[in-house]
Image (tube, rainbow, N blue to C red):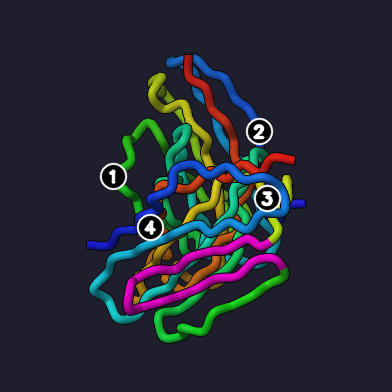
Amino acid sequence: DTEVTQTPKHLVMGMTNKKSLKCEQHMGHRAMYWYKQKAKKPPELMFVYSYEKLSINESVPSRFSPECPNSSLLNLHLHALQPEDSALYLCASSQGRGTGANVLTFGAGSRLTVL
Amino acid sequence: AQKVTQAQTEISVVEKEDVTLDCVYETRDTTYYLFWYKQPPSGELVFLIRRNSFDEQNEISGRYSWNFQKSTSSFNFTITASQVVDSAVYFCALTLGSSNTGKLIFGQGTTLQVKP
């Protein structure tokens, strides 16, 4: 069983909908990440939270809004998405602050389809 | 600029064959970390190994082995006696020691298909 849990596993939404992706970990990790992965491509970093503070936003459009309510939870709020936003969204966590030495533990992902 | 190249897009082997996945990286930093992750059809990326730039020792873990050569900027991964369960996409990735984000720079991935 994965130690990073993502819900929902699948999500279909229209371009005018508002939805959220959720991520939870109980490993005591203090850095959490959102990655986006298109089909047959490597994951691309979107956001990094370190000690519940947003430390990196990789120029992600504002229709994606991250939130880290506490050290175990990470949300990604979605609003007015475009069909090209359809992808697998992966959450990950790592010990301590985000550093180059960190080993990331990934969840199984939420597969998003925007109609 | 940093870059990771996995020249093999897809590899198909028959069970019990040995297979090597190539990874070449580029960076001017002297401190960096190299990783291999496996992504099975279920979607999650599974960590396989991390190697820092100062440790060129090869490593063996069961059927898996890794060959790190700084002289050729390569970090190749070999699966001995492949099994159907090894079928997955394998990503080689790089992070910099100076990074304060843990950002993984991924290669394009190699899809390995092991046929029974």
For the residue marked with disc 4, what is the amino acid?
Ile
User: Which numbered disc, 1 or 3, marks the residue closer to the eye?
Assistant: 3
Question: In what element is the residue under mark 3?
Answer: helix
- The Cα–Cα distance between marks 2 and 1, rounded to whole angstroms, is 25 Å
Report which residue position mark 2 lands on.
Answer: A9
Q: Taking B47 as reference, is A34 above or below it?
A: above
Q: What residue appears at the point 67 percent right and 40 percent down from the top-left corner?
A: B42
Q: Taking A75 as reference, is A93 above or below it?
A: below
For the residue marked with disc 1, what is the amino acid?
Ser
Question: In what element is the residue under mark 2?
Answer: loop
Q: Which residues are magenta?
A: B63-80
Q: What residue appears at the point 40 percent right and 64 percent down from the top-left corner?
A: B94
- Circles 4 and 3: CB distance less than 8 Å? no
**Is residue A45 visible to us here?**
no
User: Which numbered disc, 4 or 3, marks the residue closer to the eye?
Assistant: 3
Q: Taking B2 as reference, is A60 above or below it?
A: above
Report which residue position mark 1 lands on.
Answer: A59
Q: What residue appears at the point 42 percent right and 71 percent down from the top-left corner?
A: A100
Graded by Cα atoms within 10 Å as few (under 14), some (14 to 19) or many (20 or more), the crowding at tag 2 reads some
Q: Is residue B56 left or right of residue B28?
A: right
Report which residue position mark 4 lands on.
Answer: B105
Q: Is residue A83 left or right of residue B98?
A: right
Q: Chain of mark 1?
A: A
- Circles 4 and 2: CB distance less than 8 Å? no
How far from the left and from the top, in percent, is residue A90?
54, 44
Q: Chain of mark 2?
A: A
Question: In what element is the residue under mark 4?
Answer: strand
Report which residue position mark 3 lands on.
Answer: B86
Q: Mark 4 vs mark 2: tell me if same chain.
A: no
User: Which numbered disc, 2 or 1, marks the residue closer to the eye?
Assistant: 2
Q: Mark 1 vs mark 3: tell me if same chain.
A: no
